[in-house]
Amino acid sequence: MRKVYLLLSALLLPLCQLLAQGKAVIVGSIAAPLSDHIELITYPNPLLSEEVKTEVPLTGKTFRIEVPVQHAMVAELQHGEEVAQVYLEPGFELELKTSGKSFLKSLKYKGKGANENNCLAKYTLRFEEEEEYQALPDNVKLPEKGFIEFLDYRRADQLSNFEKYASKYELSPSFQSLLQAEIDFSYALDILNYHPMRQQMLQVLLSKPSADFYSYLFNLDLDNPDNLISPSFLSFLRSYTTSFARESGYTEKSPAYFKVRYDVAEQELQGQVKLVAQAQVLKQSIQQGHLKYTTQMLQNFKQKSTDQVANAYLEKLYSENSTLVAGGLAPDLKLTTLSGEDVSISDFRGNLIYVNFWRSDCGLCHVELPHLQRLTSKLGNHRVVFLNVAVGDNEEQWRQLVQKKELQGEQTLAKATPAEVATQFGLKEVPAYLLLDEEGRFISLKARRPSDHEAANDILQHLQVRQVSLK
């Protein structure tokens, strides 16, 4: 019997070790807890940057969290309003002790993975709480030379502390790569953001960087996939593509802004790092960008990516965000004119269309009417149609008001109910203003009000510049 037991033990031990390799466990105790639960937030797929939350209750002051972990990653422990990074590898079994009164300062680990996480806690605490480590609010005010000196001092101090800790405690190779990437790319991130941050803080014109200001970046291995575990590196990638677009004169209002960033990643990066950078841009473009370019990027990405989970996620996100977005085709709302003629939005294509959703009994609509009349007159000689759509209005009252005030532009009454119009165009209230291009596609779902001094210039800009860029 004893021989059978020993044989079973010998067989089960490797199996248990194998099962443990696919997960990480954290057990902990929190003195003076801030809430009755704790959350562990993980990011399993770097292509998606989507968080997965695991919430467990506190039993008194203790908790136990078990999560699947297939590769080294940085997660976040969240308790109340306190957040601390935690480093996980498959098979880690951590014992945590801390206090809700000083969550990060009192954080201590034991068990497998303790050396790495105690090191990370020290690094994070110094980075977050030492003013001399912060770019904002004071160091960014320094001139270029002074700012570089600040970054050099910080980096040297971080490397010194890291080397001292590594000489005393054994650290996994993956963790050492992580911390090195955090040090390298927190520096690089501040380099990229220095001039825009300084412009915002000091309210000065964006200055042109000196010739060698970005020289630090040339010595970095941007294509090393080991960097992808680093939160600072992922933030750097976003700023990296943004910086190129900004230097080329593009802003978030430019239709091709996200496409330019996507192309930067295509030209400047390689391998998995390129795919991650492009996935970052593509996700933003799906939610905020121009549909024409988003469609092109998604098709290109799917041709290169073998991650079917990521591809399916982006496809789903795209289908959910492909209507009420810049570049999306506006619904062909059915309308009635003052003369009783049936028309629709598509009848006005061929011109830029400034749409005014309003109602004759709306007070704010009446405030905007004189400004709208002046705007209509001012741009009367341009290829712009001012399409006024009364929503949910009393037809007779609407007709009398339009005729009495001799309102200019195309005056129409929506056939659809207010609820239907609100759903089709994402309206929350009236007045609401939209700008459509010559094909009837959205340029802006929140166009400037007629009373805005820049309304005319904004429309003219789209006529003279933006329409050319979309051809």
Image (cartoon, rainbow, N blue to C red):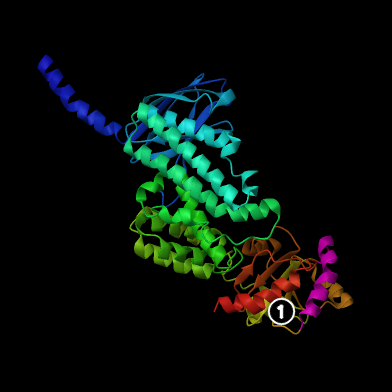
Asked if one can make out residue 438 in the rendered structure from this viewpoint, the answer is yes
| Count of number-bearing discs | 1
Estimate how packed mark 1 is, as few (under 14), some (14 to 19) or many (20 or more) residues with alpha carbons within 10 Å: many
Q: What secondary structure is the stretch in magenta mostly built from?
A: helix
Quadrant, the N terminus:
top left
Q: Which amino acid is tagged 1?
A: Val
Quarter of the image holding residue 457?
bottom right
Image: magenta residue range:
360-380
x, y percentage for residue 180? Answer: 41, 42
* Residue visible at 52% across and 58% down in the picture: 284
From the viewer's perspective, tell me whether residue 378 is left or right of residue 57: right
| Residue denoted by label 1 | 385
From the viewer's perspective, tell me whether residue 93 is left or right of residue 467: left
* Residue visible at 49% across and 63% down in the picture: 261
Q: Residue furthest right?
A: 404
In the image, residue 318 sits, relative to residue 456, either above or below, namely above
* Residue visible at 65% across and 48% down in the picture: 141
Q: Residue furthest bottom?
A: 381
**Element marked by disc 1:** strand
Q: Is residue 276 magenta?
A: no
x, y percentage for residue 64? Answer: 43, 26
